[in-house]
């Protein structure tokens, strides 16, 4: 199993990087940048080659402390994309800063005039509607600060949602199992709280107005927000379901009359 490096932790908190690997090189204790310090203390020594390596002065800087103050995001990008730092071997007569070598790829991240790497924006869940991490529409309880539902609310969501979902399944399956909406699937208790909310909220958005418990809340939440055409499509879908049911009932009544000799 490959041991973890400092860059397995770079997406969260750079200041909390663990010290992975044995310190080989002394003299970097005063560096402020934990990423650069970590790599310099644990890097290998290698002979200098102008065809493979760049020195600090090649990047337009004069001292180690000048690059120490560059943004951590530059170093994260360089090292996480395979860049290396080395100590020049057989160069003990040179100042420490002159012994430091980098791969040529560092020019993509450091050097005079190189723009800062773009900050990665956190992914936002599209279905979240206010609150930290969203809420269970209709039920009106939310994800807690620990990114989880309370045990009571998780249980309530799973078991009470089943009643509403099963009602839609029963109605639609009368017209053929192929007519059952893919959203009409009972919640899976093995899913995470976020997945449960995503499933339920999608179902609620489409069918919440069908239940007396949610009808008023649903209309307040959606009627003023969805476009007229979208709302008309919902009503049209219900109208078609009603017409299909009526047609089925008429067919059964017709058969009954023939069997009973009424026709």
Image (cartoon, helix red, strand yellow):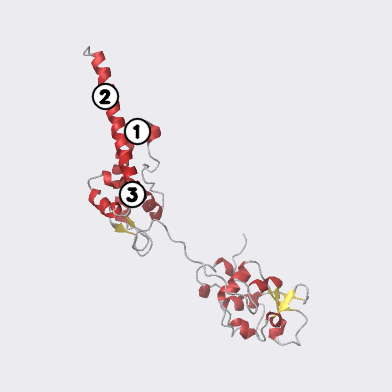
Please provide percent x and percent y for residue 33: 57, 79
Mark 1 burial class by Cα count in 10 Å: few <14, some 14-19, many 20+: few
Determine the residue positioned at 66% across, 86% down. 63
Sequence-wise, the earlier of marks 1 and 3 is 1
Q: Which residue lies under the disc numbered 3?
A: 205
Alpha carbon distance from label 2 to label 3: 32 Å
Q: In which quarter of the image is residue 179?
A: top left
Sequence-wise, the earlier of marks 1 and 2 is 1
User: Nearer the observer, disc 1 or disc 3?
Assistant: 3
If the image is split into quadrants, where does the C terminus sit?
Answer: top left
Determine the residue positioned at 31% across, 46% down. 161
For the residues bearing labels 1 and 3, Cβ distance under 8 angstroms = no
Q: Which residue lies under the disc numbered 2?
A: 250
Side of 234 relative to 93 (left or right): left
Side of 145 relative to 217 (left or right): right
Determine the residue positioned at 30% across, 26% down. 248
Q: State the mark number for residue 66.
A: none
Alpha carbon distance from label 1 to label 3: 20 Å
User: Nearer the observer, disc 1 or disc 2?
Assistant: 2
Q: Which residue lies under the disc numbered 1?
A: 173
Q: Which residue lies furthest to the front in this view?
A: 228
Mark 2 burial class by Cα count in 10 Å: few <14, some 14-19, many 20+: few
Please provide percent x and percent y for residue 16: 51, 73
């Amino acid at each position: 199993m490959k041991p973890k490096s400092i860059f397995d932790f770079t997406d969260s908190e750079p200041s909390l990087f663990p010290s992975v690997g044995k310190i080989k090189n002394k003299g970097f204790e005063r560096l402020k940048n934990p990423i650069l310090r970590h790599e310099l203390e644990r890097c290998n020594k290698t002979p200098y080659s102008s065809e493979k390596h760049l020195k600090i002065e090649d990047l337009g800087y004069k001292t180690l402390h000048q690059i120490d103050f560059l943004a951590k995001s530059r170093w994260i990008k360089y090292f996480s994309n395979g860049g290396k730092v080395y100590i020049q071997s057989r160069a003990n007569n040179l100042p420490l800063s002159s012994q430091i070598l980098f791969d040529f790829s560092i020019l993509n991240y450091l050097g005079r005039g190189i723009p800062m790497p773009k900050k990665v924006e956190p992914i936002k869940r599209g279905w979240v509607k206010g609150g930290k991490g969203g809420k269970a529409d209709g039920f009106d309880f939310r994800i807690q600060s620990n990114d989880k539902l309370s045990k009571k609310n998780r249980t309530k969501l799973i078991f009470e949602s089943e009643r509403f979902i099963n009602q839609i399944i029963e109605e639609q399956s009368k017209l053929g199992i192929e007519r059952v909406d893919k959203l009409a699937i009972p919640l899976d208790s093995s899913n995470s709280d976020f997945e449960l909310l995503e499933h339920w909220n999608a179902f609620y958005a489409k069918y919440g107005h069908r239940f007396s418990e949610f009808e008023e809340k649903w209309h307040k939440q959606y009627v003023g927000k969805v476009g007229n055409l979208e709302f008309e499509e919902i009503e049209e879908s219900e109208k078609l379901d009603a017409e299909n049911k009526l047609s089925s009932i008429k067919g059964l009544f017709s058969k009954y009359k023939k069997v009973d000799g009424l026709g």
